[in-house]
């Protein structure tokens, strides 16, 4: 489910996801501390969220989760600053840096998915390479948001003049890939598993367009929260990050396969066993999640450098101004491990 982050709509949606989707009685929630989580609405996130629900790691940490799926990362930032949500645990964070530069009181707290699990696809016969995207229409999110920044970063690295590309704000990676399949855009990103069933979706993955291998320096997702929430709900943030660290460790283990397949099938109604298997192999081979929640200064500086290149940020900000890894360290103490 994707919703607009108006305060009223968000809180109604969050409550629905937190209580109804978990199938718990209201009395169970009265004994736990609410954790309001806003995450990106990408396909792999939906599967991971379903896996989190089935394994109940958040509940193990004494939390009553309200999770909202959001198509646009800039709306996540607004909801955190406005106090509607407590934390984003799995979303792109390129837009966080310019928000901080403009005075937004936010901090990046941890890593999530370190490698981009997406690739660039097309259904157009006249698009055979990334270079062909110059002058073409490419699906994107808002400037500086995850989908847009990912696409630009790859094109820039491969020598494509991204300024000649016509970017169209469609929303999440799920929305972009759907537009690729029906041909309303010339190209766009989609989950890398679609590469295994290109004939089914009538698309082609472009050469050098698997971002997991071609753009490994890009941090796909992280966790972040407002300074106010860090000050007033620190324990909730610690417990939330601890739960997600458990989730990341779990999904990297072979014994999680059956639970992951069930979660992905529940989250994505049209998924196939073959797609599930391809993504599972990806997770086991690449192990893309930040099991110890760590994010380095080098990774954050790379992200900021892209923002400066795109003109959405004036300069690279100091690590201590944009990040607070102390909460991640406390979270790991709860489950064992070090940042």
Image: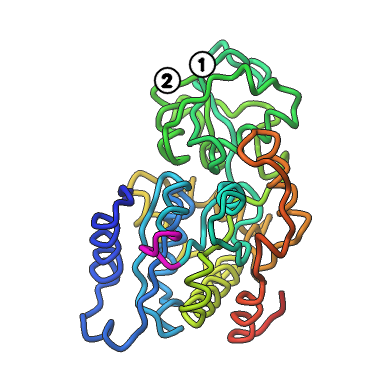
> Is disc 2 in contact with disc 1, using a CB cutoff of under 8 Å?
yes
Residue extending farthest to the right is 298
- Is residue 321 part of the magenta span, yes or no? no
The scheme the figure's colours follow is rainbow
- Is residue 83 part of the magenta span, yes or no? yes
Residue 25: x %, y % from top left:
21, 80
For residue 72, above or below residue 293: above
Residue 27: x %, y % from top left:
22, 86
Nearest the viewer among 337 and 311 is 311
Nearest the viewer among 252 and 148 is 148
Q: Residue at x 47, y 40 (%)?
A: 173
Residue 32: x %, y % from top left:
34, 85
Question: Which circle's residue, 2 or 1, is located before the other in the chain?
Answer: 1
Residue extending farthest to the front is 103
Give SS at disc 1: loop
Q: Which residues are magenta?
A: 80-86
Q: Residue at x 45, y 31 (%)?
A: 169
- Where residue 161 sits, quadrant-wise, is top right
């Amino acid at each position: 489910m994707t919703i607009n982050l108006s305060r009223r709509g968000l809180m109604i949606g969050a409550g629905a996801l937190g209580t109804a989707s978990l199938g718990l009685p209201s009395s169970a929630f009265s004994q736990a501390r609410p954790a309001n989580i806003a995450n990106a609405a990408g396909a792999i996130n939906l599967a991971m969220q379903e896996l989190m629900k089935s394994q109940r790691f958040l509940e193990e940490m004494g939390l009553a989760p309200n999770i909202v799926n959001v198509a646009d990362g800039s709306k996540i930032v607004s909801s955190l600053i406005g106090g509607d949500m407590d934390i984003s645990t799995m979303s792109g964070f390129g837009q966080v840096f310019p928000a901080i530069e403009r005075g937004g009181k936010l901090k990046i707290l941890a890593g999530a998915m370190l490698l981009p699990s997406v690739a660039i696809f097309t259904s157009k016969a006249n698009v055979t390479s990334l270079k062909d995207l110059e002058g073409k229409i490419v699906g994107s999110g808002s400037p500086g948001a995850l989908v847009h920044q990912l696409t630009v970063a790859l094109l820039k690295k491969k020598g494509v003049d991204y300024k000649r590309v016509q970017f169209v704000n469609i929303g999440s990676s799920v929305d972009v890939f759907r537009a690729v399949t029906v041909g309303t855009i010339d190209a766009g990103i989609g989950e890398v598993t679609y590469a295994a069933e290109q004939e089914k979706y009538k698309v082609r993955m472009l050469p050098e367009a698997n971002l997991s291998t071609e753009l490994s320096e890009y941090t796909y997702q992280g966790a972040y929260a407002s300074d106010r929430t860090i000050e007033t709900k620190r324990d909730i943030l610690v417990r939330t990050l601890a739960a997600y660290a458990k989730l990341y460790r779990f999904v990297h283990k072979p014994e999680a396969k059956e639970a992951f397949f069930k979660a992905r099938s529940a989250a994505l109604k049209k998924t196939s066993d073959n797609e599930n298997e391809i993504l599972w192999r990806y997770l086991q081979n690449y192990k893309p999640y930040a099991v110890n929640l760590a994010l380095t200064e080098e990774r954050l500086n790379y992200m900021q450098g892209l923002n400066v290149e795109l003109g959405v940020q004036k300069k690279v900000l100091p690590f201590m101004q944009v990040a607070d890894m102390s909460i991640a360290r406390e979270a790991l103490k709860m489950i064992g491990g070090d940042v």
